[in-house]
């Protein structure tokens, strides 16, 4: 192995190389093209879901139904994602991705039904539970492909490209919502209908993606996909993934924290103190900040001037600094209002009000922190393996623990826990996640991943 290969984190000693196809076929089957299509699927499905959730309360005046739907969603998501790696390896990533994308249209359609029929709250909660199962499948398939397609030196770049396209869905959705609801006090039917049409288009894209086993990376290596085993064999491999790499448990607190903060950001901050057009504008800049944050951290994590271990610790240090900046800043705003104080007035902050400037800047920083956290977490998992089947397990564990945390946060909000309690809990969990991950990064993230060690 030469010095450049060591520096890039690439072990070529036992690789077999293939010639990439030429012309349009080669362009379409290129890993970057496939990750772009993958990003478009998530642009139209979870991206628009995020735009809706980011409005606070799903765009509804009363957020309680949205809280209950999110509890149901994340509870089923947590269970489904734990086994989704096995489902993905049995059905294949494309079919798993297609099935997973279908739940988003149902969920967005349920909010349209709620807008037309105010007593349709049960339908929204049921749709949330179904979406949780579908989302577990979609995100597990997505994670395995996103981390398996690039070479090791490209993983930060591919993750950031995916994250930018995915969050562009939030930007577009939030921009549409801002335009259609600029002078409204609640989200209109037109917004939900537009979201629904785009989401239905997104469900078709997985069907036209290239089979992962036919994708050849830019360095000539093929994506590793295990032959589809029996259900019994695949489920037996699930606990084996823990035994093979028990260090993954140290990432569980990081997984747990990764969606916990959405409840405070979206509902207890954006949904609580701003009027509808300010919430919509905040939503636009939040997802724009995600794009910027994902690109910047991707450049750091793929820097060729630094060894991979140094990049890992650099990403950790950036997250540590961002947590303190965001939460010290947020603390001074959070102590100015409570659930009780807001219930005594209908006045909310508008985009023309003097306090708005500082508060939207905080929301931008929240978006950057979120993107940096998610991209770094995916990158750490990608540094542990290059095998699509193994990565399906890892991303399944990630989404399972992540959703369990989100369910807990939404349940606390539905019980009307004090805003300050939820805010402090996000702060503590983020710091705990970082400190638990530190020894795992030290012991498990090496300068290259051994191909022979990839098979579970």
Image: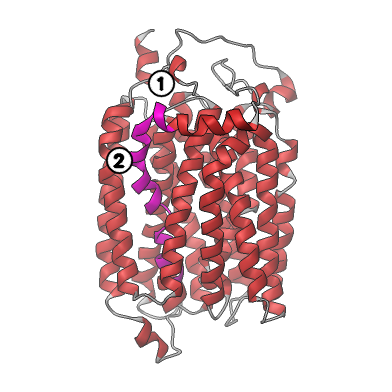
Q: Residues within 10 Å of mark 2 (few under 14, many from 20)?
A: many
Which region of the structure is painted magenta?
242-267
Percent coordinates x, y for residue 397 in the rendering: 47, 42
Task: Looking at the image, tell me whether mark 1 or mark 2 is earlier in sequence order.
Answer: 2
Percent coordinates x, y for residue 236 in the rendering: 53, 31
**Horizontal side, residue 158 vs residue 88: left or right:** left
Which residue does the numbered mark 2 point to in the structure image?
Answer: 437
Residue at point 38% right, 34% down?
301
Label 2 residue SS: helix
Label 1 vs label 2: CA separation? 19 Å
Residue at point 55% right, 63% down?
72
Which residue does the numbered mark 1 point to in the structure image?
Answer: 449
Residue 250, magenta (yes or no): yes
**Horizontal side, residue 443 vs residue 268: left or right:** left
Q: Are marks 1 and 2 in contact (CB under 8 Å)?
A: no
Q: Residues within 10 Å of mark 1 (few under 14, many from 20)?
A: some
**Closer to us: 295 or 410:** 410
Q: Quadrant of residue 449?
A: top left
Q: Quadrant of residue 248?
A: top left
Residue at point 45% right, 30% down?
241
Q: Main secondary structure of the magenta part?
A: helix
Percent coordinates x, y for residue 92 in the rendering: 66, 33
């Amino acid at each position: 192995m030469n010095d450049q290969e060591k520096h890039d984190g690439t072990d070529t000693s036992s690789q077999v190389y293939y010639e990439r196809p030429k012309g349009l076929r080669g362009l379409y089957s290129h890993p970057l093209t496939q990750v772009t299509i993958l990003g478009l699927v998530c642009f139209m499905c979870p991206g628009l879901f995020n735009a809706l959730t980011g409005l606070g309360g799903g765009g509804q005046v009363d957020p309680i139904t949205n809280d209950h739907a999110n509890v149901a969603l994340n509870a089923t998501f947590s269970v489904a994602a734990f086994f989704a790696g096995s489902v993905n390896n049995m059905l294949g990533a494309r079919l798993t991705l297609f099935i997973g994308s279908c739940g988003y249209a149902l969920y967005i359609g349920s909010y349209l039904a709620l807008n037309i029929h105010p007593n349709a709250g049960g339908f929204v909660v049921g749709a949330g539970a179904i979406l949780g199962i579908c989302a577990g499948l979609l995100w597990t398939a997505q994670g395995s492909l996103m981390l398996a397609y690039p070479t090791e030196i490209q993983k930060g770049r591919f993750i950031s490209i995916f994250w930018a396209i995915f969050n562009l869905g939030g930007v577009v959705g939030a921009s549409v919502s801002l335009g259609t609801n600029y002078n409204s006090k609640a989200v209109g039917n037109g917004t939900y209908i537009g979201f629904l049409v785009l989401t239905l288009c997104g469900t078709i894209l997985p069907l036209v993606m290239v089979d992962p086993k036919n994708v050849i990376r830019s360095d000539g290596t093929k994506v590793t996909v295990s032959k589809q085993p029996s259900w019994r064999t695949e489920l037996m491999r699930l606990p084996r993934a823990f035994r093979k790499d028990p260090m993954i448990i140290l990432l569980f607190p990081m997984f747990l924290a990764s969606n916990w903060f959405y409840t405070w950001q979206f509902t207890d901050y954006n949904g609580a103190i701003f009027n509808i057009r300010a919430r919509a504008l905040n939503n636009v800049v939040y997802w724009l900040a995600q794009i910027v944050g994902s690109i910047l951290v991707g450049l750091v994590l793929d820097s060729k001037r630094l060894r991979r271990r140094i990049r890992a610790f650099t990403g950790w240090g950036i997250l540590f600094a961002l947590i303190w900046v965001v939460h010290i800043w947020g603390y001074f705003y959070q102590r100015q209002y409570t659930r009780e104080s807001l219930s005594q007035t209908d006045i909310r902050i508008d985009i023309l009000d003097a306090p708005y400037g500082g508060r939207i800047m905080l929301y931008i920083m929240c978006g950057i922190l979120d993107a940096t956290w998610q991209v770094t977490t995916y990158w750490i998992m990608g540094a542990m393996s290059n095998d699509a089947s193994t990565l399906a397990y890892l991303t399944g564990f990630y989404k399972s623990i992540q959703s369990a945390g989100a369910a807990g946060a939404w349940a606390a909000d539905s019980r009307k826990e004090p805003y300050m309690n939820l805010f402090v809990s996000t702060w503590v969990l983020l710091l705990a996640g970082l400190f638990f991950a530190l020894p795992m990064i030290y012991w498990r993230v090496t300068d290259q991943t051994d191909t022979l060690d990839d098979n579970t």
